Image (cartoon, coloured by chain):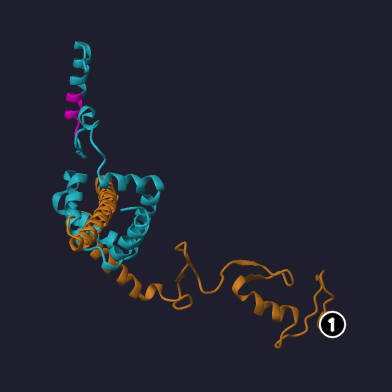
Amino acid sequence: MSLLKDDDSNSQVLKFNTFSNIFADLLDTIVANVASESHRIVRLGLDRYLDNEDEELRLSTEARVQANDPRHTGEASGKYVMDIFGQTHPHVATEIFECMNCSQSVMAGRFAPHLEKCMGKGRKARVKSNNTSTKQNGSSGAALI
Amino acid sequence: MFKCSEKERKKICSTVLREKRMKASVKRPPTPDPEFERDREPTLKEIVNIRLTESGERERLQELLRERLIECGWKDEMKALCREFARKKGSNNVTVDELVAVITPKGRASVPDSVKAEMLQRIQKFLTPTAL
C-alpha cells in the first residue's frame, strides 16, 4: 500500500476478492441446500425410478402404444366408447319401459320415433283414436297441433 | 480457569462417546474453544459478513441467487448429478457431505456468467457506499 499507483489496483483486487468470497459463501449455502434436498429424496425413496433405468423407458413406450391404439381415439368413433370411469355405453339406449300414450313396451332409444307415430305429431303420423287416453282427446289431439 | 469435577468430567466423556457412536450422516468441525477466541480483532471479512447479515441483505441476496439458479436450470442439473451419483453408489450409502463434495466443483463452474455478474454487482452496490 506504499505506491500510489499500486494502491488503487490493490484495493480494486481486494474489493473484487471480497465480493467473490461473499458470492462463494452464498453459493455454498445453496449447494448445501440442494445436496440436502437430494439426499432426502434418495434416502426416503421418493424417487421412483432411481434404481430402474429401464422402467421409465418401458412406461413411456407403453403409453405411446396405448395412444396409438384405435380403441381410445375420439368420442364418437367405433361402437363402444369408454368414458372417464372406464364404462362403455351402447350406441342406442336400451332401457325398456311403457309408453304413457299407448301402453306399449318401447325401447328408450326408439321412443322418439315411436311417439311420432303414436301421438300423431310427426310427418308419417296417422290419426288414431284412443279410448283410454287421459292426457289428450284422441282425435282432436291431432287437430290441435 | 475452567475446572471441572470428576463427575462433570465423566458426564462430558460419556456424551462425547455417545456422539461418536451415533451414525453421522453430517460431519461438522468441532465447536471452537472460547478461550482462544476472546482476544482477536475482527477481520475485514468478518466485519463485512456482520454488516451483510444484520441488515438482512444477505438473506435477500441468497433468495435472489436461489431464484436465478432455479430459472436457468442450474438446480435441476445439480439434482440430476446427485441422482446419478446415488444410483451408482446405491441409495443407502450416500451422505450429505458426499453429495456436497460431488456438486461443489461442478456447481461453481456452471453458474451462468450473467447470474454471477448480477450478484457481484448487487453486492458491490450494497457494500460500496459504506467505507470499504
**Residue at 83% from the left image edge and 81% from the top image edge:** A139
Q: Chain of mark 1?
A: A
Instruction: Note whether residue A114 is visible.
Output: yes
Camera-nearest residue between B98 and A92: B98
**Residue at 59% from the left image edge and 66% from the top image edge:** A95
- Check disc 1: other Cα within 10 Å, few if <14, some if 14-19, many if 20+: few
Residue B63 locus on image (x, y percent): 37, 54
Stretch in magenta: B16-23
Q: Secondary structure at mark 1?
A: helix
Question: Which quadrant of the view contains residue B112?
Answer: bottom left
Q: Colour of chain A?
A: orange
**Residue at 56% from the left image edge and 69% from the top image edge:** A94
Q: Main SS type for the magenta part? A: helix
Question: Which quadrant of the view contains residue B84?
Answer: bottom left
Judge left or right: residue A138 versus residue A32.
right
Amino acid residing under circle 1: Leu
**Residue at 20% from the left image edge and 30% from the top image edge:** B36
Residue A77 locus on image (x, y percent): 45, 78
Camera-nearest residue between B46 and B130: B130
Residue A19 locus on image (x, y percent): 27, 56
Quarter containing the N terminus of chain B? top left
Judge left or right: residue A144 versus residue B94.
right
Verify whether residue A65 appears in magenta. no
Camera-nearest residue between A61 and A134: A61
Residue B101 locus on image (x, y percent): 17, 50
- Residue A85, compared with residue A67, is above or below; it is above
Judge left or right: residue A95 versus residue B5.
right
Q: Colour of chain B?
A: cyan
What is the residue that sits farthest to the top in this orientation?
Answer: B6
> What residue sits right under mark 1 in the picture?
A144
What is the residue that sits farthest to the left in this orientation?
Answer: B89
